[in-house]
Image (tube, coloured by chain):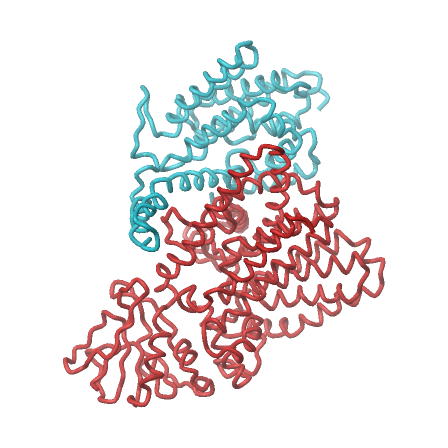
Chain colours: A cyan, B red
Amino acid sequence: MMLFKKNKFLLFLLLGILLMVLNFVNHGNFVVATLNIIYLGLTVYFISLFSKDGLKLSDWFLTLPLVIVPIFWYQFTQIKVLLAIILVLLMIIYLKTKVKLLMFFVVAFYLLFASVVVNDIGKLPYSIDVERTIYHLSPTDIAIEDMQKHALFLPFRLRTVVFSESAYIYVLLSRFAELFLLKNFYTILLLANLYPLFKGLISEAKVFNQHKIFYVVFFLPLIIAASARSINIYNAFIFSTPIFLYFILKGLLKVNRKVYYLLLLISLVLVTSPLK
Amino acid sequence: MNKLQKTLLVLIFLAFIFRSFSLENIPANLSNDEIGSAYDAYSISKTLKDEHDKFLPVLFESHGIYRSALAVYLSVPTIMLFGNTNFAARFSSAFLGSLTIVFLGLLVYELTKNKTLALLSSLFLAIAPWHFSSSHWLMEANYGLFFLVLGIYLTLAGINSKNLYKTIGGFVAFALSIYSYYTYWALAPFILGGILVLFRAKFLKIKHFYLAPVFFCFLMIPLGLTWLATLGSSRISTELIYKDTGLNKFIWENHYNGIQIIQIYFSAIIGKYSDYINPAFLFFYGSNLMPKDNPYQVGFILAPLIVPFLFGITKISKYFEPQYTKFIYFWLLISPIAPAVSRGDIFNVRALQIVAPVSIVVAVGSLELFKFLKKRMLLKIVAIIVLVISLFYWWMIYFHYFPVQSAQGFQYGYREIAQFINNNQSKYEKIIIDPRFGDKNYYFGGLPHEYIPYYTSLDPSKVQQARKIQTGGIEFDKFEIREINWDSEIVNEKYLYVVPFDNFPKNQDLKLVSEVQLPNHLPAFKLWSLQ
């Protein structure tokens, strides 16, 4: 362990190899594996720039949890990881530039475009496939019509206002809330990492208020993901990962290591379980 | 008491009134489980024996399994008082559901001495759609929740004030929650254990407190003995995850080894736990009042309250002392454990207990949110308007659409058939009831052998002596409950035949004497006779 503390390069090299192995075991695609490693590396760099008190990555305990985040060894298509890498680069520029307002809008527009592509509701060059969204879900339309028909206790005009397509907002919010399923989080981040994530969120939540861009990076892709008819949880969270990683890294400094190891063991049981 | 507190008190009082409102017709009929409890309560009230001729049972046999007893016994006085109606069957649930609201407020006040927080906690429980619905039904889980909240309140108040009677009362309430619903077999001991661990320093100091666990164990003896006697068929045995047919099929088909089987069960439990704390389930569709794809579903708690919930989850320690903060988190985390280890799909009845700690967190979040918004009056008004709109939608769904849409699932029609029988009983020598309902494409199996005796106030001793018919079904008094196949049916002049609406007789001489329609005016049952 002392060797790692002295030689950060060796530590990073070993972790890089471990991540490559995990990628290979999971999907065997070298290009995607490399892109995933670049995405993680850039994310860590972004967080180190962003953190006021810097990042303490010399300890293997503070770095290993990053490598075992399943979203970094998932078989994305190359274009999706590339889009995520571009997002991190844009956020790095946002941190370094003085024209923050301009970059804020660049990031927001980029996310709008990229989230549509990543969640398979649009194609390059930009076009939205409405049939792949929740708008025009026939059961919802039928239900709205049915509710209107049976709302005889309301004046006719009011019926079409009370029971209207505004119901899609409720459907969208419901699907948005569904993304925050515990299972989704332990699938993409690993159960053990939810402990430092929670600790980090409690102590660092105010970062959302200090940097409004966090709201955009976190919520916009998820709202677009929620509007997709079929949701792939990895695609939905690919752009939010840097934010989760920030809180995990911050939380790791505050966790009880024994509890973390116990959760790691439980995570191993879950990850290798035949029941997914 | 300030103006805000007075307003909250009025709102809670209104919630009380609403819980007793339209108990007779919403839901449209007593459900499968409700009629089981209601009929047993009626039978106990007349003969001290249940439907199966058992003297004052501790667990009630129901459709081949054994269910908890307390809901039945607590319905006995109301059925004796109000007669065999839906109102009588449901009133004790509505009453205890209302008291749960009060005791949750008292508990929060006991732990925080903050009146506004206590009243807000009560208010959010009062307007929680799933708690409201379960108080409107004769639902075992609702009785369990009342005794659980009462148990927590009395135990903590007793420990705080060093009052032996309160502490014993708390332990007794925990025991009664276990007698109420099988979910509490796991939950109540966990919570009681949590309290004893968290407050052990105070509890162990006072020697006479040791009497409370003794009382608890003593009360558990009858249940324990009955459970051992019915091992294998009590719900606690039949509902556990290791009995899950889907999971067992998956294991059996893939020939997994011992370690993999443990992993599979473990993953299934964690997955279910996750499903029960799914924010969409809790705040958007968990009440399951409307068909699956309907966008106007409601959750356990009204959807806009997800915002204060998220706000409050990290702020509990601002209102509760460290030990109580730990307890609230513990309560929140432990509540979905029992349903998570149960078999089958996600079932909202098993998860009712989650509403209590969630209401407390929502109350904390609301206070914090209002502080955060400070003088932004407009945002506060918008927040209140959104909440009122969601209340309006929920009431429309619950009081107008739900009774109509769910009527068939609640076996609507048997009460109306019983009314016809009550008025015309003397005309018929025998009444043959086909227990199927629905339509020819898919018939469900109904429970007319419970509904009809309940609504006709038939002497329960006649049902206790019911005989099996050789060709299938049962008979008691002048009733035969069996499937009617018109091809082989020998039609008798003085018989009344009750069949699903689309089971048309072949005999042209049979006359339609009555038709029962669902609330949406679709036919449900037809009554035929030669007379």
State the residue in front, A45 or A28: A45
Q: Residue at x 73, y 70 (%)?
A: B215
Q: How many numbered tags mark residues here?
A: 0
Residue at far front of view: B3
Classify residue A96 by image quadrant. top right
Q: Residue at x 59, y 63 (%)?
A: B144
Q: Position of residue B501 (x, y in %)?
A: 25, 70
**In this rendering, is residue B10 above or below A12?**
below
Classify residue B396 by image quadrant. bottom left
Report the side of B217 relative to A232 (left or right).
right
Q: Residue at x 77, y 60 (%)?
A: B158
Residue at far left of view: B508
Report the side of A202 relative to A179 (left or right).
right
State the residue in front, B486 or A113: A113
Q: Position of residue B324 (x, y in %)?
A: 72, 48
Q: Quadrant of the C terminus of chain B?
A: bottom left
State the residue in front, B399 or B308: B399
Classify residue B193 by image quadrant. bottom right
**In this rendering, is residue B133 above or below B372?**
below
Report the side of B40 relative to A256 (left or right).
left
Q: Position of residue A98 (x, y in %)?
A: 55, 9
Q: Position of residue B182 (x, y in %)?
A: 56, 64
Residue B242 appears in the rendering: no
Residue B460 appears in the rendering: yes
Report the side of A86 relative to A267 (left or right).
left
State the residue in front, A86 or B78: B78
Q: Residue at x 36, y 83 (%)?
A: B422
